[in-house]
């Protein structure tokens, strides 16, 4: 299996889509009333994950130097999620 294989691309897109949908459902049903301090960080993380999913879908190849944007998006989404956890713990 190569990195450029269509199955790998669809797997990455499916994982990103699942993460975005999970965050959206969590925000919509559970966190909106209970803890509004973490809402912005969680929403930002969900939007970044959605943007990465769209980027991976329209990118013709997942190899090359363009993957630094995908890595930067993952790091930024993780930072926002850690920020949300810190805001919730206070």
Image (cartoon, grey):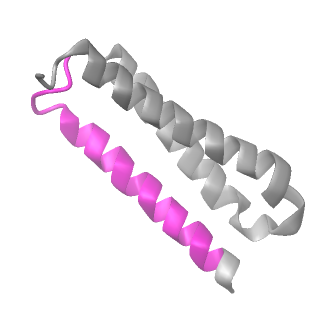
Whether residue 1 is situated above or below residue 79 in the rendered picture: above
| Residue 60 visible, this orientation | no
Q: Residue furthest bottom?
A: 90
Task: Classify residue 66 by image quadrant.
Answer: top left
| Residue 40 visible, this orientation | yes
Secondary structure character of the magenta stretch overall: helix
Apparent side of residue 78 relative to residue 33 in the rendered image (left or right): left
Query: Residue 75 colored magenta?
Result: yes
- What is the span of residues highlighted in magenta in the rendered image? 60-87
Whether residue 73 is situated above or below residue 84 in the rendered picture: above
Residue shown at 30% from the left, 39% from the top: 70
What number of labels is visible? Answer: 0
Apparent side of residue 3 relative to residue 14 in the rendered image (left or right): left
Query: Residue 78 colored magenta?
Result: yes
Task: Classify residue 32 by image quadrant.
Answer: bottom right
Quadrant of the snapshot with the N terminus = top left
Whether residue 58 is situated above or below residue 74 in the rendered picture: above
Comparing 76 with 31, the one in front is 31
Q: Position of residue 38 (x, y in %)?
A: 69, 66
Residue shown at 58% from the left, 44% from the top: 46
Q: Residue furthest right?
A: 33
Q: Residue furthest front?
A: 1
Residue shown at 15% from the left, 26% from the top: 3
């Amino acid at each position: 299996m190569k990195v450029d294989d269509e199955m790998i691309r669809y797997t990455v897109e499916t994982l990103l889509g699942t993460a975005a949908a999970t965050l959206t459902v969590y925000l919509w049903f559970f966190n909106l009333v209970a803890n509004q301090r973490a809402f912005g960080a969680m929403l930002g993380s969900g939007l970044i994950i959605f943007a990465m999913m769209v980027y991976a879908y329209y990118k013709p190849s997942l190899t090359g130097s363009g993957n630094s944007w995908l890595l930067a998006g993952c790091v930024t989404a993780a930072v926002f999620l850690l920020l949300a956890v810190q805001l919730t713990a206070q």
